[in-house]
Every structure is written in C-alpha cells, then in structure tokens.
C-alpha cells in the first residue's frame, strides 16, 4: 500500500494534500533516516521548525500530526513495530489577541478589490472578485464562502443568507442575513448567468453542484484554497490573508463608531466580548501612531 493509498483510505479528501505536504516536509528533512527516526529525532525536527520558520502554534501541531500519520502508515504496512511519538503533544500557545494596529485599512481593501486582475484563466475573474467582495464587504470566513449555496443568494432583495456552522461554538460565526453592495449584485448576476454555467460543464461527474462558488473544473472548493485563489501571481510580500481581511473589516466598522451590538450581529459573533477585542482605545491609536511615525523610533 502506498502512502497516498493509505491516506485516501483513512482520511478525508480535504486533508489529503496537507497531510502529504507535512509528511514530505519530515521525510525531506531526514531523507533515508526518516523511516527509522526515534523520539529524539522527532523532537529535533520540531525544534528545527521552531527555529527556522515563523510557524503559528496551530501550524506546528499540524506538522507533528503529519509525522504521527507517517509512523501510523509504517506500522500498518509492517515497516516498523513501534511508534516513536504517539504520545507527544505540543504545548505552544495560540495567541488570541487581535493585532488591531496591523490590520488593513478600508482604503487598502477597496483598492485590492478594484485593482484585482488575473493574467491567465480570465473566465475565473468574476468568481475571484466575488470571493474578494464577500471577504471585504460581508467579512465572511473562508468556511462560510465555500459553504454558500446558490439558493442563499437573493438578488431581488439584495441579500445573502449565511447559514453558519452546524455545531455552533463561541468561535464559530452564527447564521445571519447580510445586505449585498450594489457593485456585488451585477457581478453575481453575470457570474450566475454565464461564468458559473461554463464551469459546471467541466464537471461531468456531478454537473448539478449546488454550491455557489465553484472550482475551475466545476467542483466544490475547499476553504484552504481561498487564499491561493485571491493571491495568485501576487508577490509573497503583497499577499493578503483572508482571516486578516475579516478582522480588518470588523475593526474598521468599530473605528467608525458603529454600535458594538450592530457589529456583533454583522460578524456573527456569539458574544459581544469577542467583538470588543477588535476595538482600539484612543490611547492605543495614539501610541501606534507614535511608534510608526516618530523620527526616533
């Protein structure tokens, strides 16, 4: 059984590529020594990632998870008789603070939308601009965008229904109805009437996909693919993060002195305390300005 066969059998399609990537990262590091790696070798590899890559603690845990899957594969195929790191867990803490001073301004987001172009596969331009518009005008998460159904769009009323997640937690956005911007309505109308129908023709296995946003072959897309779509051909230093767009939109609404409760409903936050995290005090605004522009900084 090949590694890919094993992953396809055990894990979902949405995690296949990320698991393969994390496993390859480990095997590339140890080369031929990888199958015989010990507990100390795994610790050394994690330390290497910590020192040489600015990885989020959550990403680091995914890297370790990939290594664990790799050794599970070796066990099941008889290439090892032990698992060196099955009981290893990382305690790196994920910072929950919103870095408000590092977010995008409303002007920056608007320029990104207006100037967005692609050089190849121009038939995907409308779809991509719709994705960007949903990020910067409705502050949707990538999960919400990929879960949208055609029936969730009401162009007559100029509204979009966000159904939220089936399992609501304090972090998952709640269901809500949000208004569409005028520029979105025409864009979405043209996409539904023309571009989306073209994409469906490429999907011979399932030409009746009901998802609103489709991949280039008419298939449903995965949340992790949103960032790649909107940043295609953009230099790494200029790439825009979807989660940071959502955070920026919420913070910018609060900066304009909108009522916290109104912004809470817009963002789908379960608790007002979550929304307040995006708010800057006047002192913080002044301090950030001093840090950024003072000649002796």
Image: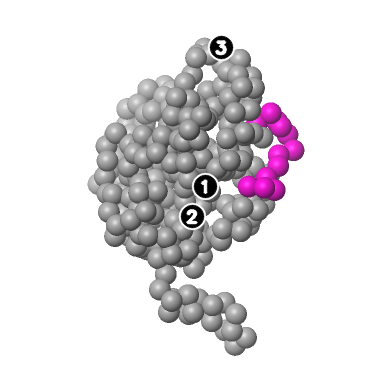
Magenta span: 113-124
What number is the disc on residue 204?
3
Q: Quadrant of the C terminus?
A: bottom right
Q: Residues within 10 Å of mark 2 (few under 14, many from 20)?
A: many
Q: Residues within 10 Å of mark 1 (few under 14, many from 20)?
A: some
* 168 to 150, vertically: above or below: below
Q: Residue furthest top?
A: 204
Distance of mark 2 from mark 1, alpha carbons? 8 Å
Instruction: Please tell me whether residue 118 belongs to the stretch shown in magenta.
Output: yes
Contact between labelled residues 1 and 2, with CB atoms less than 8 Å apart: yes
Contact between labelled residues 1 and 3, with CB atoms less than 8 Å apart: no
Q: Secondary structure at mark 3?
A: loop
The residue carrying mark 1 is 137
* 110 to 168, vertically: above or below: below
Horizontal and vertical percent position of residue 181: 55, 42
Q: Secondary structure at mark 1?
A: helix
Which of marks 1 and 2 precedes in the sequence? 1
Q: Residue furthest bottom?
A: 296
What number is the disc on residue 249?
2
* Residue located 29% across and 33% down the image: 166
| Mark in front: 3 vs 1 | 1
Q: Residue furthest front?
A: 157
* Residue located 60% across and 87% down the image: 296
Q: State whether residue 262 appears in this view.
A: yes
Of 201 and 5, nearer the camera is 201
Of 23 and 130, nearer the camera is 130
Horizontal and vertical percent position of residue 250: 44, 56
């Amino acid at each position: 059984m090949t590694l890919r066969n094993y992953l396809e059998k055990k894990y979902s399609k949405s995690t296949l590529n990320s698991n393969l990537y994390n496993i390859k990262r480990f095997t590339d590091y140890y080369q031929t020594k990888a199958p015989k790696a010990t507990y100390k070798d795994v610790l050394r590899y994690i330390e290497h990632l910590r020192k040489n890559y600015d990885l989020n603690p959550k990403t680091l845990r995914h890297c370790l998870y990939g290594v664990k899957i790799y050794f599970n594969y070796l066990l099941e195929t008889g290439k090892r008789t032990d698992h060196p790191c099955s009981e290893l867990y990382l305690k790196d803490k994920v910072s929950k603070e919103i870095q408000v001073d590092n977010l995008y301004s409303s002007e920056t987001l608007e320029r990104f939308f207006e100037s967005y172009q692609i050089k190849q596969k121009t038939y995907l331009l409308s779809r991509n601009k719709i994705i960007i518009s949903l990020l910067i005008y409705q502050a949707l998460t990538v999960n919400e965008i990929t879960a949208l159904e055609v029936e969730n769009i009401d162009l007559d009323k100029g509204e979009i229904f966000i159904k939220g997640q089936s399992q609501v937690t304090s972090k998952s956005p709640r269901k809500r109805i949000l208004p569409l911007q005028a520029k979105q309505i025409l864009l979405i109308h043209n996409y539904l009437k023309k571009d989306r129908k073209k994409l469906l023709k490429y999907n011979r296995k399932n030409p009746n996909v009901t998802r609103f946003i489709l991949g280039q072959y008419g298939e449903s897309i995965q949340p992790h693919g949103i960032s790649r779509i909107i940043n295609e051909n953009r230099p790494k230093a200029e790439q825009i993060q979807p989660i940071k767009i959502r955070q920026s939109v919420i913070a910018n609404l609060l900066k304009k002195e909108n009522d916290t409760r109104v912004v809470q409903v817009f963002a789908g936050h379960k608790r007002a305390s979550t929304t307040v995290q995006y708010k800057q005090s006047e002192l913080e605004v002044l301090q950030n300005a001093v840090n950024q522009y003072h000649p002796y900084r």
